Amino acid sequence: MGTSLNRVEEEDYSSYTNSSDFISISLEDNNNTTKTATSTSKSSSELHPVCLPPHVTTWQKLNHRLREIFFPDDPLHIFKDQSWRRKLVLAFQYVFPILRWAPHYSLSLFRSDLIAGLTIASLAIPQGISYAKLANLQPIIGLYSSFVPPIVYSVLGSSRHIGIGPVSVASLVMGTMLDGEVSHSNKKDLYLELAFTSTLFAGLFQASLGIFRLGFIIDFLSKATLIGFMAGAAVIVSLQQLKGLLGITHFTSDMELIPVLESVFNSIKEWKWETIVMGFCFLIFLLVARFIIGHLPKGVNPTSENKLYFHGPHLQLAIKTGIITGILSLTVSSLTLILKSFLTIVHGSFSRSAVNYNAGAKTIFSNIVMAATVLVTLLFLMPLFHYTPDFVLAAIIITAVVGLVDYKAALRLWKLDKLDFVACCCSFFGVLFISVQIGLAIAVGVSVFKIILHVTRPNTVVLGNIPGTQIFRSLNHYENATRVPSFLILSIESPIFFANSLYLQERISRWVRGEENRIRENNESALKCVILDMTAVTAIDTSGIDAISELKKNMDKRSLQLALVNLVGTVMEKLHQSKTLDSFRSKGLYLTVGEAVDDLSSSWKHWP
Amino acid sequence: MGTSLNRVEEEDYSSYTNSSDFISISLEDNNNTTKTATSTSKSSSELHPVCLPPHVTTWQKLNHRLREIFFPDDPLHIFKDQSWRRKLVLAFQYVFPILRWAPHYSLSLFRSDLIAGLTIASLAIPQGISYAKLANLQPIIGLYSSFVPPIVYSVLGSSRHIGIGPVSVASLVMGTMLDGEVSHSNKKDLYLELAFTSTLFAGLFQASLGIFRLGFIIDFLSKATLIGFMAGAAVIVSLQQLKGLLGITHFTSDMELIPVLESVFNSIKEWKWETIVMGFCFLIFLLVARFIIGHLPKGVNPTSENKLYFHGPHLQLAIKTGIITGILSLTVSSLTLILKSFLTIVHGSFSRSAVNYNAGAKTIFSNIVMAATVLVTLLFLMPLFHYTPDFVLAAIIITAVVGLVDYKAALRLWKLDKLDFVACCCSFFGVLFISVQIGLAIAVGVSVFKIILHVTRPNTVVLGNIPGTQIFRSLNHYENATRVPSFLILSIESPIFFANSLYLQERISRWVRGEENRIRENNESALKCVILDMTAVTAIDTSGIDAISELKKNMDKRSLQLALVNLVGTVMEKLHQSKTLDSFRSKGLYLTVGEAVDDLSSSWKHWP
């Protein structure tokens, strides 16, 4: 009996269910040892029951869903099953993570932190100065960003690897957005006030994202679009530095490619060959050495001031700028923190955390060391460099932003995912030819469109049986998979929503039509049953429910049986509530495709 | 040997893979006849190989993808494998479907069509008049919409069930949008020109959607949001008719709830009790009888005119109105055409197709009968009703739009899908309190947000083994499913995109943490392996690829094995191209969860 099954299986799958009384398979055929005894079709009571999931109230579902949306990391898990006293200690440590590591701090930890802190300081000082320039601010303000925030972070922060400081993209966007409305050269004070106010709003926005657990908003800036965005921004910023490198005095403050190039070539007469030679020599030196760790700023330690702008016509601009820069810097740092693997290919704004990580920072104390170093610089070294020529700053900025053009990552996108590459190009050219904000908007739009497109036009795949098993896989993917006569087995690779319910109905009808044509051409046995593998249909809405019942009616009209396999809990529940499931109760619901094929074909009972 | 397996399986799954040399199972235990011989773990060569899908070039992929997006219905399938002559005939029939049915037309078909045509005409005449009123147009223009389009459709159209005519929602939106800028009472001629131009653009827009195969755009108006939208619009329109019912002369042209109610109550002095009594009596009569098939319009047959508006300040408005009404009417008619099941609960704008369907229309000729009837009305009956009192029109409109408030469908949404109900409410209140266009925008926004939310926060489900089988299902859903000691089996229920890659990494880490805590509390055997069932991961982008390799590194750090099960073709290909798959090659890739569990647990070889 066993050997007969082996022989039959290789020739004609339709005999497969004949051997329902067969239990053991032979051992003598070595090529077929993978074949398992699969017969289960003697009577329907032998099937594994398909049951509804246990009842859950709407309130429980909502509670679960909200917790999944807002607290995916379960931030309070450390408090579970603790005494009240311990809970209090943990709560303090939760708010002030410094309490966690400070009591155990040792000399050897300090040694590592000292080296790491000094290393990142040597990176932070020139970065602070050049990023300040990107935001059209004085270098000293850039240095403050490497001095105050690290100290705050060392008390409140929790990741020892993250290096705190300004983010190039955010600085650039702030510079452009503010300068578009208020010129930094003509209205210096107003510009400074707006910059401070924007920064405050960026902070408030970030804090509220944290408090209201809305961090997932930043997930919508995909890495692909950021790569394009940063490259585009880097090109623009580099071109703008031609002002300093060529010694041009009249230059556009626009950020688009065309006005910048126009500015460069319309002022050919202004080009100063001395500046050009010196600037380019210095630039080549920097690019060759990639030695951007210099000490070149100006100014002394000023008192902190209350230059905030809370009224008047530009407040809206300040808020908008704050929100956009807030999102941008969060995105950049979350990418830095979580995707360390990505760090290996991206330099630039990620570089500080990378250095901190590689320099072996043991605790957040490394940030304090860095802050102290920056303070020393502010107090003692900066007066030495009071007058830095423009071409030097320009060269530094170019060197810093060139690293943002990550062509390797772009190539990888092209190789792996063409749509990601398109998103990357859109944001690159958006920044280059339209504007920084529009470029960013296009990038987000393309990213969201990608998701939407995947949902509106989901794949449907025809499955076949892998001979000698109960496994059913895509005919296109597994070449040894074979069609089961009289069955069309489709796997639907997406939740069924209003956005794809009509499409899926049409597509499934077309599969059926195609299969019937194929059968007619090859004179095979007629199609009798369509099985939908619903494993990947992880959700359904009311349009989807209607689509299923409509499909059932259509199949009934064509005298085809329709069976649903492996319904996910929530989908099953909704189909049950809408009474759609009722028409599937007998011979329409199965746990696996194999059981569906066995049961249905044995129920027809007209095999040769 | 067989009996020992049966006993062992019921007690402890961990012994399951012990019996790897077991081949036959006993017959004596009747309760266990569903158990199949599943052992495959003797050596890895017994596993079913996981292979890469056959190579497909980028161009082939793009071609396939574009065809799926733009030609899901394969519109040219009828031309396949036909002679050139036959192809020409088919092409003519494709463009002019009348050629398909006209040659076979018979008297009996005509009889059915005559009855159906007369029936829908009796519905079309009052509808045309009241819908014209919604668009602030003369009744006669409404009647033309039931006269010209059906004739055009009978030549070019292909569905015999669809009844052609004006759509209430589209009429309403056009009326509001145009009236917001150009008052229909003060600037009658300009308003009429704009209305004609909008209609032209609506038609051009719909035609271009058809030609460029962009019909999927209309999928984004979900049924749920349309239900809310139509109910909100119906309430507003009904309230506006209070002008006619109460005999008020000074009335707002705004469409929001608050200005309309203000208008009603600020003009209490204008209320005329005679109009009120007559109006409400007539309204009650109509509502009780639902007898809206009357003959009440005015006017005679005018010549067609060239009143189009292609220049000047309002052109943008006309285009915008055209596009929005074009989308709306397409959505309504596509819902009518495809989801007939839905018709049973929705009246109003769908009613004409429903009547046509129920009246037994056999061919599109029923539309010609209807058009002829409307023409007769235009020529002979209309002068009789030249002066229709406003309160009569108001009562007709209220009766017509009341059917749009489909509370039963709204209740069904609440029962089946809370998020759909929220979308419905948002569009209802958006229309009621803000404006028709904003209401529509909110509705689309909520619908898209629903999709996005599902993608950003996908489910992850813990699977367990259904005893005695190789089947693994959700522990929450199937109560008889049991955990496999030392394994954590997770099913990821969504494609992995940038929008959820960080979330999934966090969530999986949390599952692992939770499982380790659970094991510690229950003193079970330590966690050794995490299996990800990737069946529902039907797509992946570069962020997703990074997430997988990051996850692999994390698991390696925790000394846990990570195995991927049932990778879909495209996902597998991308993981292969990015070299991520390399680290999974040995003991990391399986065709089914069962094989993964068997192979991994047998490879550890330290079972008691």
Image: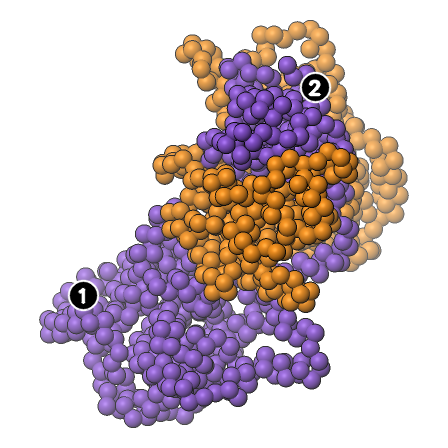
Chain colours: A orange, B purple
Q: Secondary structure at mark 2?
A: loop
Residue B495 location (% of width, % of height): 60, 44
x 83%, y 33%: residue? A290
- In the image, which disc is placed on residue B436? none
Q: Do the residues at discs 1 and 2 belong to one chain?
A: yes
Q: Is residue B487 above or below residue B398?
A: above
Q: Nearer the viewer, residue A164 or A195?
A: A164
Q: Position of residue B393 (x, y in %)?
A: 24, 76
The kind of residue on which mark 1 rests is Ser
Between A151 and A67, the residue placed more toward the observer is A67
For the point 72% across and 51% down, which residue is it?
A11
The disc placed on residue B605 is 2
Tell me the subunit letter for badge 1: B
**Which residue is located at x 14 percent, y 72 percent?**
B281
Disc 2 marks a residue whose amino acid type is: Lys
Q: Quadrant of residue B241?
A: bottom left
Discs 1/2, front: 2
Q: Which image quadrant is residue A37 in?
A: top right
In this orientation, which residue lies closer to the viewer: B111 or B550?
A: B111
User: Measured along the vertical axis of the image, is residue B377 above or below residue A29?
Assistant: below
> Which mark is on residue B267?
1
Q: Are marks 1 and 2 in contact (CB under 8 Å)?
A: no
- The mark nearer the N terminus, 1 or 2, is 1
Q: Is residue B186 visible?
A: no
Query: Horizontally, is A422 left or right of B526 in the view?
Result: right
Q: CA distance from mark 1 to mark 2?
A: 89 Å
Identify the image quadrant of the N terminus of chain A: top right
Residue A506 is left or right of residue A468, and the answer is left
Residue A148 as seen in the image, left or right of residue A114: left
Q: Position of residue B215 (x, y in %)?
A: 55, 65
